Image: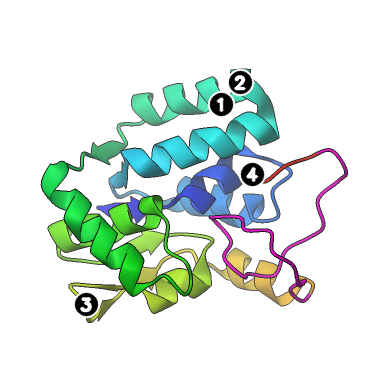
Amino acid sequence: MIIVDTGAWVGLADRRDQYHTACRDFFKRNREELITTYPVLVETVHLLFNRVGVHMTLAWLETIQTQGVNVYSLDLAHLRRATNLMHQYADLPMDLADASLVILAEHLRHGRIVSTDQRDFHTYRWKNHHPFTNLLVANSAWRECILHLPTPTTGNHHDPRRNHLPTQPQPAGTSRS
């Protein structure tokens, strides 16, 4: 099973996203089961509402259901672990969606993930010492995309799916939340 982060979902659903081609190509080629968490779905829906609208967001939700994407449910016991992880990685910072994916990796006993958030998932460790393997980074289209991105801009804006990755300027009136 491959773990899927918010950025990969948004990159797939938003044709204007700078990672769209790499994400689309990955999902087209993939033949393995996919799994994500409810915090990731919440974050994705929030971002997609702002980027592609309600109709397209609902279509995306219906698509992941018909494609059999698995959703891992966190319980109250996971909240303590998520909080500890968020404290441990507060300098990044780690949000609840990312913490839920670390917990999921610990449950699955592997860290095979698809994410546009290369920096954070290179830093995070499941079971405190196992690294994630970002399968999107291994994709040649992703590498090509990274090579042609502008350098990072400074500022306090935080996009939870692209922690400090090089970004392209957003058109006026758009929001990454």
Check whether the beta carbons of the residues at disc 2 and disc 1 lie within 8 A of each other: yes
Which residue is at 15% across, 65% downward?
A: 109
Measured Cα–Cα span from mark 2 to mark 1: 5 Å
Q: Residue furthest left?
A: 77
Disc 3, SS: loop
Give the residue type that dot 4 points to. Ser
Disc 1, SS: helix
The crowd level at tag 3 (other Cα within 10 Å; few <14, some 14-19, many 20+) is few
The crowd level at tag 2 (other Cα within 10 Å; few <14, some 14-19, many 20+) is some
- Which label sits on residue 164? none
Is the stretch drawn in magenta largely helix, strand or loop?
Answer: loop
Quarter holding residue 56: top right
Q: Nearer the viewer, residue 59 or 163?
A: 163
**What are the residue bounds of the magenta stretch?**
151-173
Picture coordinates of residue 50 (x, y %)? 66, 33
* Residue at the spot of label 4: 177
Check whether the beta carbons of the residues at disc 2 and disc 3 lie within 8 A of each other: no
The mark that comes first in sequence, 1 or 4, is: 1
**Is 164 within the magenta?**
yes
Picture coordinates of residue 55 (x, y %)? 61, 18
- Which label sits on residue 57? 1
Does residue 84 sit above or below 21 in this rendering? Answer: below
Q: Nearer the viewer, residue 167 or 64?
A: 167
Give the residue type that dot 1 points to. Thr
The mark that comes first in sequence, 4 or 2, is: 2
Q: Nearer the viewer, mark 1 or mark 4?
A: 4
Picture coordinates of residue 36 (x, y %)? 32, 45
Quadrant that contains the C terminus: top right
Q: Nearer the viewer, mark 4 or mark 2?
A: 4
Measured Cα–Cα span from mark 1 to mark 3: 34 Å
